[in-house]
Image (cartoon, grey):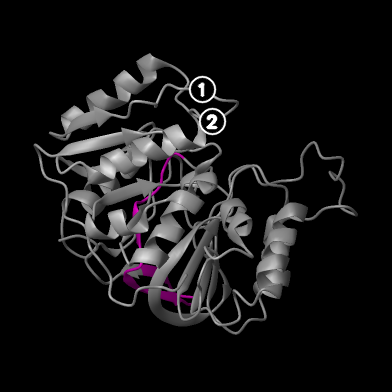
Amino acid sequence: MTTICKPIKPKALRPGDTVGIVAPSTPPFEPSALEFACQWLGKLGLKYKIGKHVFDSWGDLAGVDEARLADLHEMWADPEISAIIPVRGGNGSVRLLPKLDFKLISTNPKILVGYSDITGLLIPIQQATGLITFHGPMLNSFFESRYTHRHFRKALMQPKPLGVISDPSPKDIWSPQYPPARLVIKEGVAHGPLIGGCMTLIRQLMGTSFEIETSGKIVFLEDLEEEPHNIDRMLSQLLLAGKFQQAAGIIIADCIDCRPGSSKRNVLTLNSSLEHVVRERLGNLGIPIVYGMRLGHGAQKPTLPLGVMASLIASRDKVDLKIEESATV
C-alpha cells in the first residue's frame, strides 16, 4: 500500500459529539471499569455508543475477528459518531487488516486514537488513506494523569497545531526518573511527517503491505516489558529493512520496564542496557536520535497525530519535538 500524499483531517471533537467505543483487540476486564471511563467522557461533554461486541470473549480477544471488525465498520459508517476510541489494547488488531474497509474509512473521516496494540490500526489506516490518526491514550487511560488528560483534550478538541510537546512535571526533583526524558544520542535537526508507535506491532507488520513507511519522516518507537536483547532484535530487523537509514530523525521513547528480567538473560554477558542498545544500533546513522521521551505506556503521555508535519531539534542546549500542523479541522 502507498501513502496518500494529501492528508485527510478529521473534525475536532466538540461538546455534544458522540464517541464510538470499540474493542478491536482485547476486551475490558470489568463492565464497571468501562462505565467508570465513560463518566470521564461525560466530563468532556461527550456522549458515547458502545459496540455490540465489546464484551465478547474469544481467547484473549474481544470476540472473533468478524465481530470485532463489524463493530469497527458500524462505528465508521454511523454519521452520529465523531471519534472512535478503543477500550484498550492487548492483542488482535492486526488480524482485522485483511478485511478492513479502507474506502469506508477514507470517505467518513473520524478521529481514531489509541496506542500499544492499536498501533496495528493507526499506521496502516494513516498510510493507506491519508487520514490523520492519533497515538494516545484509550478509553481506559485518557484520565490517568493531569498531563495525559490535558494533552488528550488539546489534540482532539482544539483544531490548531499542538506546538512543542512538553514533558510531564517530575513528581520529585530529587528522585528523577531515568532515563532523562530528552537524552540526546545524536545531535541534529529533522523536519517531516510524524509516524510511529509500539515496536512490537511495527515489527509484526514488517514484510506485509502494511509495513511502516519511514523515508523522510520523524519516527518514534516505544514498547512495554521487552528486554534489551529483544529490542536489539527489533531494531536490527528494522535496520536490515532500511527503515531507519532514510528517516529524518528517530525518537526512542520511554520503554516501560524494558530491563533484563526473567528470561534467563539477566546477566551482562547475555543482555545489556537499553541505552547501550540504542546507542550501538542507531548512534551512527547521521540523523538526530533522542532517547527517553515520555510517549509510551507510562501513565503520562501526550496524544500525537500521525501524518502531520513536525520538527525535531536535538542539541546540547535543548530537545524540542514540535507539531507544526493542525491535525483536525
Return the residue at label 1: 57
Q: Quadrant of residue 158?
A: bottom left
Residue 243, labelled with which disc?
A: none
Query: Does the magenta portion include 303?
Result: yes
Q: Pinpoint residue 40: horizontal percent, then vertical percent.
A: 24, 28
| Image quarter in which the C terminus is found | bottom left
Q: Secondary structure at mark 2?
A: loop
Q: Amino acid at mark 1?
A: Ser
- Residue at position x 12%, y 33% from top? 45
State if disc 1 and disc 2 touch (CB < 8 Å). yes
**Residue numbers of the magenta segment:** 299-321
Q: State the mark number for residue 61.
A: 2
Q: In the rendered view, would you say 30 is above or below 135?
A: above
Residue 166 seen: no
Disc 2 marks a residue whose amino acid type is: Leu
Q: In the figure, residue 68 lies in which quadrant?
A: top left
Name the side, left or right, on which 31 lies relative to 297.
left
State left or right for residue 214 relative to residue 21. right
